[in-house]
Amino acid sequence: QVQLVESGGGLVQAGGSLRLSCAASGRTFSNYRMGWFRQAPGKEREIVATIRWDSGTTSYADSVKGRFTISRDNAKNTVDLQMNSLKSEDTAVYYCAAKLYYSTSYNNWGQGTQVTVSS
């Protein structure tokens, strides 16, 4: 059973940085695509960034390109999201998710971590 545990959220001023980490366990993730999603109050959940575990291929939402970086650590089985130049509109609960790379939807989710950016 896949388990995903996020950490690293918190309160930061606009322009600052935070690094989120997702500890993944329960599977060998070489055939998985990992994703970071976020959901702000009153808004739908949106995808932020994804990474294919085996190749390291990444993708980003336009709103975070050039500011956020997703990476994975094979030794630690973690997927990190480095967030720089944070804006108030980045405030949301951030979720780590996983799916087999050929699946159409993510079916494994973490509990979420709150990121609040003060302006």
Image: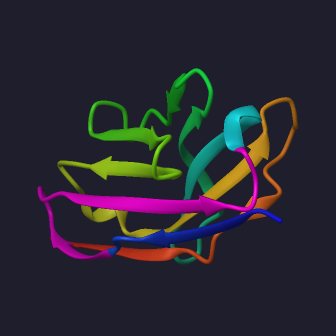
In percent of width and height, residue 83 lies at 28, 51
Residue at x 53% of width, y 63% of height: 23
Residue at x 73% of width, y 38% of height: 32
Tell me the quarter of the picture where residue 29 sits.
Answer: top right
In percent of width and height, residue 98 lies at 71, 51
**Depth check, front residue: 90 or 18:** 18
For residue 116: magenta?
no
In terms of secondary structure, what is the magenta stretch mainly?
A: strand
Viewport quadrant of the C terminus: bottom left
* 82 shown above or below 88: above
Tell me the quarter of the picture where residue 97 sits.
Answer: bottom right
* 84 shown above or below 59: below
Range of the magenta residues? 10-28
* 55 shown above or below 24: above
Most distant residue in the right direction = 103
Residue at x 12% of width, y 59% of height: 16
In percent of width and height, residue 27 lies at 76, 53
Left or right: 68, with 26 as reference point? left
